[in-house]
Image: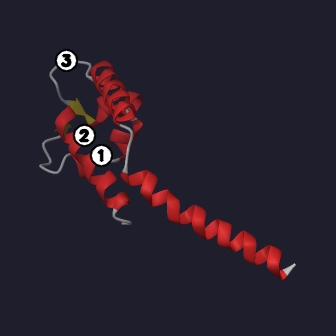
Amino acid sequence: MRLLLLRYALLALLAGAMLPARAQAPDPARQDQMRTELRKRFGAADANVDGRLTRDEAKGRMPWVYRNFEAIDSAHTGAVTMEQIEAYAASRRGRRAAGG
């Protein structure tokens, strides 16, 4: 029984050690697909087609942007651009990859 538990613990440790390696090497095709989807959703949410989303525009169609609006809108202009959203998402990915 003790050997079986030790074996499971070792497998869990090995599986956990492999996860960060996968997280650090994202699939470029998947990233492109996600970026395309994000841009499509941004365009659909941008009701007045000014290239910026207000909190109200983000609320119904981009819930992640809505929830993180204050952090994305670091200049406190009341609107965010696609570039700001992508930069914020990249910084979040970087922090996750670094373990933070």
Quarter of the image that includes the C terminus: bottom left
Pointer 1 local density, CA inside 10 Å: few below 14, some 14–19, many at least 20: some
Residue 36 versus residue 79 in the image, above or below: above
User: Which residue shows up at 25% across the image and 47% down it?
Assistant: 88
Residue 24 versus residue 5 in the image, above or below: above
Residue occupied by mark 2: 85
Residue occupied by mark 3: 49
User: Which residue shows up at 29% across the image and 46% down it?
Assistant: 89
Q: Amino acid at mark 3?
A: Val
> Label 1's element?
helix
- Residue 81 visible in the snapshot: no
Pointer 2 local density, CA inside 10 Å: few below 14, some 14–19, many at least 20: many
Viewer-proximal residue, 1 or 93? 1
Image coordinates for residue 82, horizontal then vertical, percent: 21, 33
Residue occupied by mark 1: 89
Q: Amino acid at mark 1?
A: Ala
Quarter of the image that includes the N terminus: bottom right
Mark number, residue 37: none
> Label 2's element?
helix
Its colouring scheme is secondary structure
Q: Nearer the viewer, mark 1 or mark 3?
A: 1
Q: Cβ–Cβ below 8 Å for labels 2 and 3?
A: no
Viewer-proximal residue, 44 or 57? 44
What whole-number distance in Å separates the C-alpha atoms at marks 2 and 1?
6 Å
Q: Cβ–Cβ below 8 Å for labels 2 and 1?
A: yes
